């Protein structure tokens, strides 16, 4: 049996390939465990600066495999579903940027994985949707990252109707950062990763910390935390180097690249 997740390193990029194409890359226990393990491994790897999630086959992911809902014991079912949503926590806690490259269907928990990623590049013919309502369930895991991107009325509409939305609609809603022709998806994702690799990794980590922590706090408390994070960043040798490089019009060579 092939590994449901393939991960490898390429030029400071950690590439995670969803590898259950025969099942449209649906989540099962092993898939979820390996996905989360790969994310954490790359965040801890000093050679990696950016993580890219892509998919084998026609589709990014069509959610949780339906046979995962056969568990009769509520405690075991909760443990399983906690595992299915674990990537939401992991990506938010990671210091390194995570890019999802979405093609085909990115629906249900597949859409949740994309919504939880820091950046999304999508093929122009990709399809998103929180579709669990169609089988009598609800996309409650994906609802949390989705709620950070869209207003409540649109959130309710997506969750309650299970409607598909095109990549163009997702782009207009702020769920997708870049739209590309299907054949250009991988190229674009790697170009974005290379652009981020050229940036100060400590600045990127500070951005993630503010977005995932300070933005969820009461307004004034969030500003205070942002100031603390910015102070820490401004005192870092990389920031001083970046300012000097800008002033001297030279390309920065970050003195500290490992977080």
Image (cartoon, rainbow, N blue to C red):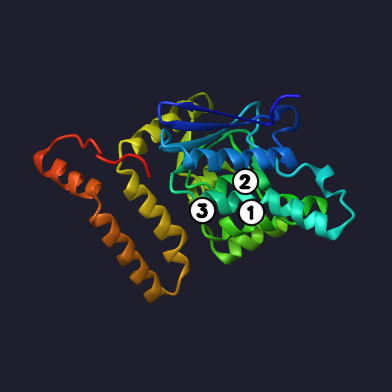
Quadrant containing the N terminus is top right
Are the residues flagged by discs 3 and 1 in contact, CB closer than 8 Å?
no
Q: Is residue 154 above or below residue 132?
A: below
Q: Residue furthest left?
A: 248
Q: Observer-nearest residue: 12 or 259?
A: 259
Residue 149 position, x and y percent, is: 51, 57
Question: Which one is earlier in the sequence, the residue at label 3 or at label 2?
Answer: 3
Quadrant containing the C terminus is top left
User: Measuring 50% from the left and 53% from the top, which residue is drawn there?
Assistant: 93
In this rendering, would 111 be left or right of 122? Answer: right
User: Measuring 70% from the left and 28% from the top, which residue is drawn there?
Assistant: 21
Label 1's element? helix
The disc label shown at residue 92, or none:
3
Question: Which one is earlier in the sequence, the residue at label 3 or at label 1?
Answer: 3
Q: Residue furthest right?
A: 72
* Residue for badge 1: 142
Residue 90 position, x and y percent, is: 56, 50
Place residue 17 in its image quadrant.
Answer: top right
User: Measuring 66% from the left and 56% from the top, which residue is drawn there?
Assistant: 141
Residue 133 position, x and y percent, is: 76, 54
Label 2's element? helix
The disc label shown at residue 128, or none:
none
Q: Observer-nearest residue: 130 or 101?
A: 101
In this rendering, would 239 be left or right of 79? Answer: left
* Residue for badge 2: 111
Res 11 seen here: yes
Distance, label 3 to label 2, CA atoms, is: 16 Å
Disc 3: CA contacts within 10 A as few (<14), some (14-19) or many (>=20): many
Are the residues flagged by discs 2 and 1 in contact, CB closer than 8 Å?
yes
Question: Which one is earlier in the sequence, the residue at label 2 or at label 1?
Answer: 2
């Amino acid at each position: 049996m092939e590994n449901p997740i393939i991960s490898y390193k390429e030029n400071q990029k950690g590439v995670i390939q969803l590898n259950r194409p025969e099942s449209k890359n649906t989540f099962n226990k092993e898939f979820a465990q390996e996905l989360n393990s790969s994310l954490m491994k790359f965040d801890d790897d000093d050679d990696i600066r950016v993580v890219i999630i892509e998919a084998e086959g026609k589709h990014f992911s069509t959610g949780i495999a339906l046979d995962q809902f056969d568990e009769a014991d509520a405690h075991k079912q909760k443990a399983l579903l906690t595992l299915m949503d674990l990537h939401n926590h992991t990506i938010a806690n990671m210091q390194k940027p995570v890019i999802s490259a979405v093609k085909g269907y990115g629906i249900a928990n597949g859409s949740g994985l994309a919504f939880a990623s820091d950046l999304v590049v999508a093929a122009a013919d990709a399809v998103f949707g929180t579709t669990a309502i169609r089988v009598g369930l609800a996309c409650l895991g994906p609802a949390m990252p989705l709620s950070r991107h869209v207003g409540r009325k649109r959130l309710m509409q997506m969750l309650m109707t299970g409607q598909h939305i095109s990549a163009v609609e997702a782009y207009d809603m702020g769920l997708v950062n870049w739209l590309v022709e299907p054949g250009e998806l991988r190229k674009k994702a790697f170009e974005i990763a290379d652009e981020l690799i050229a940036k100060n990794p400590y600045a990127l980590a500070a951005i993630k910390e503010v977005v995932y922590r300070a933005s969820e706090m009461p307004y004034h408390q969030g500003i205070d935390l942002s100031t603390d994070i910015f102070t820490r960043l401004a005192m870092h040798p990389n920031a001083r180097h970046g300012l000097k490089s800008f002033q001297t019009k030279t390309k920065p060579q970050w003195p500290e690249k490992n977080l």
